Image (cartoon, rainbow, N blue to C red):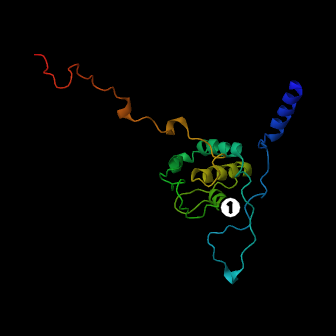
């Protein structure tokens, strides 16, 4: 009877586990550029354009961590200082000049932007572009917490210097007593 209960418990636990599928060599749904990138909610004639495809890797933790690896490999951190902003704008804040939607970030990487951001269209494979898009969006908290990659060890919050300093030895003289001379 115990074996039957244990087997049934194992089957229930295995059926309850849900694991994300990792697609290692996938072509992004949009072959190339998104059809329409919206920089503003304003549209001529008042008609809203059809929704363009969302980034394919916004829910895939492995692809976001690959985007993190590519961000360093392509030296994006050289200008964006690991997302905090340097020569390039910060990627960890809530203000995005050209939009924070996946299509906007994709267009920024592919086409570049005036005054500094070079165009990488045709130089980076489409799959890697979408992985970079997912990672860049994760830096400002636009993805779920369970999808976002962790910080590198050198960026972790360290114990403060004061907490590590040894405290001076306390005197052995009881309070209120005269020190020996």
Residue at x 74%, y 65% (from the top left corner): 52
In the picture, measured across the screen, residue 89 lies left or right of residue 28, that is left
Task: Report the residue that reaches farthest toward the top.
Answer: 181
Residue at x 60%, y 59% (from the top left corner): 112
Task: Report the residue that reaches farthest toward the bottom.
Answer: 45
Tell me the quadrant of the picture where the N terminus can be found. top right
Task: Report the residue that reaches farthest toward the front.
Answer: 1
Q: Which is more toward the observer, 55 or 59?
A: 59
Is residue 147 shown above or below 39? above
Q: Which is more toward the observer, 91 or 72?
A: 91
Q: What crowding class fits label 1: few (fewer than 14 Cα within 10 Å), some (14-19), or many (20 or more)? A: many
Is residue 87 shown above or below 14? below
**Quarter occupied by residue 104:** bottom right
Q: Position of residue 26 (x, y in %)?
A: 79, 47
In the picture, measured across the screen, residue 113 lies left or right of residue 165, that is right
Residue at x 62%, y 55% (from the top left corner): 142
**Quarter occupied by residue 40:** bottom right
Q: Position of residue 11 (x, y in %)?
A: 86, 34
**Quarter occupied by residue 50:** bottom right
Q: Secondary structure under badge 1?
A: helix
Q: Which residue is mark 1?
A: 103
């Amino acid at each position: 009877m115990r074996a039957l209960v244990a087997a049934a418990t194992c089957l229930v636990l295995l059926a309850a586990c849900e694991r994300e599928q990792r697609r290692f060599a996938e072509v992004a749904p949009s072959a190339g550029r998104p059809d329409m990138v919206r920089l503003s909610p304003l549209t001529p004639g008042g008609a809203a354009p059809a929704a363009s495809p969302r980034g394919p890797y916004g829910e895939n933790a492995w692809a976001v961590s690959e985007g993190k690896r590519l961000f360093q490999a392509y030296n994006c951190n050289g200008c964006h200082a690991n997302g905090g902003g340097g020569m390039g704008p910060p990627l960890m804040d809530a203000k995005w000049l050209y939009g924070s939607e996946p299509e906007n970030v994709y267009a920024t990487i592919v086409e570049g932007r005036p005054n500094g951001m070079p165009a990488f269209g045709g130089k980076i494979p489409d799959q890697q572009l979408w992985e970079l898009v997912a990672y860049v969006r994760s830096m400002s908290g636009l993805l779920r917490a369970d999808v976002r990659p962790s910080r590198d060890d050198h960026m972790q919050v360290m114990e403060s210097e004061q907490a590590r300093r040894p405290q001076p030895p306390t005197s052995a003289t009881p309070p209120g007593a005269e020190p020996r001379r």
